[in-house]
Image: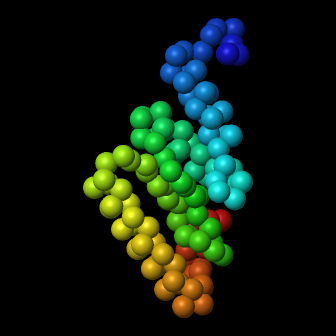
């Protein structure tokens, strides 16, 4: 591990952060795309807290979901069922947006500029 600017070894927590940061930087989705830079820090924090992530996105204006999101992974059946319900709501919201022409309001666009 590299020494800091004062020539000291980083703390254990900083080492854990750097290791997770490196791990997240190597993660790719089913399409081979890396974790979005806008959500990478959130993914690092959740995983360091012992909350495994499944998928994430920083949000997109022209396609997909317009807001950041993170899918949490769990082995608990009740939680898995809730996550599946959430995914179905997202699909329904995307379908409605497409039916409305996929328009993004100026108010929403300002959030991303």
Q: Nearer the viewer, residue 22 or 103?
A: 22
Q: Quadrant of the N terminus?
A: top right
Can you give x and y, in whole percent of width and height, for residue 108 in the image? 55, 74
What count of labels does the image hold? 0
Among the 4 quarters of the image, the one containing residue 17:
top right
Which residue sits furthest left?
A: 78
Query: Would you say residue 36 is visible in this rendering?
Result: no
Is 4 placed left or right of 87 in the picture? right
Among the 4 quarters of the image, the one containing residue 24:
top right
Q: Residue at x 36, y 68 (%)?
A: 85
Q: Nearer the viewer, residue 28 or 103?
A: 28
Q: Residue at x 38, y 60 (%)?
A: 83
Query: Would you say residue 29 is visible in this rendering?
Result: yes
Q: Quadrant of the C terminus?
A: bottom right
Is 104 placed left or right of 34 in the picture? left
Can you give x and y, in whole percent of width and height, for residue 111 in the image? 57, 67
Q: Residue at x 60, y 90 (%)?
A: 101
Can you give x and y, in whole percent of width and height, for residue 93 in the image? 46, 79
Relative height, residue 58 to residue 41 (above, below): below
Can you give x and y, in whole percent of width and height, for residue 27 in the image? 65, 44
Q: Residue at x 51, y 83 (%)?
A: 95
Relative height, residue 47 to residue 5 (above, below): below
Q: Nearer the viewer, residue 1 or 3?
A: 1
């Amino acid at each position: 591990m590299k020494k800091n600017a004062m020539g000291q070894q980083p703390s254990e927590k900083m080492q854990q952060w750097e290791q997770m940061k490196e791990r997240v930087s190597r993660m790719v989705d089913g399409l081979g795309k890396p974790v979005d830079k806008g959500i990478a820090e959130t993914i690092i924090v959740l995983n360091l807290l012992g909350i495994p992530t499944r998928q994430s996105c920083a949000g997109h204006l022209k396609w997909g979901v317009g807001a950041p999101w993170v899918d949490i992974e769990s082995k608990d059946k009740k939680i898995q069922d809730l996550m599946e319900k959430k995914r179905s709501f997202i699909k329904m919201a995307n379908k409605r947006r497409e039916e409305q022409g996929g328009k993004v309001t100026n108010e929403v666009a300002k959030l991303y500029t």
